[in-house]
Amino acid sequence: MLAASINAAPLANTDWNATELGELAHWPRTLRQAVEIVLDSPWPLLLLWGPRQIAVFNRAYAELAGPHHPRAPGGSAPAINPAPVAAAGEAFQRALLGEHLYLQHQRLTVLRPNGAQQLDCDLHLTPLADDEGRPAGVLCAVRANLQRQPAPVLTGLRVLVVEDNLDSQYLVCEMLKAFGHEADGVGHAEGALELLSAKHYDVLFSDVSLPGMSGVELARQALVGRPDLRVIFASGYGDALLRHLEFPFQSLQKPYEIEQLQAVLDGIRRGSGQSSV
């Protein structure tokens, strides 16, 4: 009876081989059951699984997160922390260690068609273990309250986003536009240099690791012709590749939070300058 439940739609109707979770037959029992709960629930549910926090979510969660959010069921490690993690990251770490938590009035930043907004939400965090009983994931139930407040809007910066993951590139550009910035996206350094020569940008926001020329070399070449260009790096490998650079920059560690990017851009907008990290 359990096997029939595990292989029932919509779990078995998803091509999990195309996700970072891999083949369904190789999943731990807990992961199978948790994903089935997520996909069958009519209420917003988010599952984070494994060291890379691979995200699985249902349609209700995706609709709550807004039209720019990836479609359900997910199945990949997010480049930007999901809104519940951004709002309550410490609580998620506690839940991963085995603590059941209920958090009230958490402010979740989401993108609506009319811009970025903050939702007042309650979160219920349930720890999950693998087949050996080791901490492996967190199941998050989200309940949106009626009170909703818009997030502050930033304006005025022209940002070039260089990211070879097209889904992440699109999401970042849409977030920037929602906060009042102009944003263009490109997937490689050579294309970025062409755009920089054809259009004026205030900020270069680039992944450090790119196909071909690295983000660091891209910034170095861009600054030759535009020494006033502000540089922000996104890196999934720590700051080892950013040590001892000869030009000023700021960096965000993947997965970063949209609030972190907002803070950096707001500082640039106010003219607070840059500092090496």
Image (tube, helix red, strand yellow):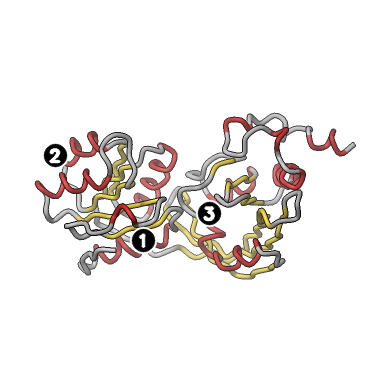
In the image, is 221 to the left or to the right of 215? left
Q: Amino acid under label 1?
A: Gln
Number of callouts: 3
User: Does the CB distance between marks 1 and 2 fall below 8 Å?
Assistant: no
Front in this rendered view, residue 217 or 74: 217
User: Does the CB distance between marks 3 and 1 fall below 8 Å?
Assistant: no
The secondary structure type at the circle numbered 3 is loop
| Sequence order check, earlier mark of 3 and 2 | 3
| Sequence order check, earlier mark of 3 and 1 | 3
Label 2 crowd bin: few (<14), some (14–19), many (20+), radius 10 Å: few
Q: Quarter-wise, where is residue 88 in the image?
A: bottom right
Q: Amino acid under label 3?
A: Pro
- Residue at (59%, 41%) from the top-left corner? 75
Residue topped by disc 2: 197
| Quadrant in the picture for the C terminus | bottom left
Label 1 crowd bin: few (<14), some (14–19), many (20+), radius 10 Å: some
Q: Amino acid under label 2?
A: Ser
- Residue at (72%, 54%) from the top-left corner? 129
> Where 229 falls versus 73 (above or below)?
below
Front in this rendered view, residue 184 or 63: 184
| Quadrant in the picture for the N terminus | top right
- Image position, residue 208 (x, y; %): 32, 47
Task: Residue 262: give its label.
Answer: 1
Front in this rendered view, residue 7 or 27: 27
Residue topped by disc 3: 82
- Image position, residue 64 (x, y; %): 58, 51
The secondary structure type at the circle numbered 2 is helix
| Sequence order check, earlier mark of 1 and 2 | 2
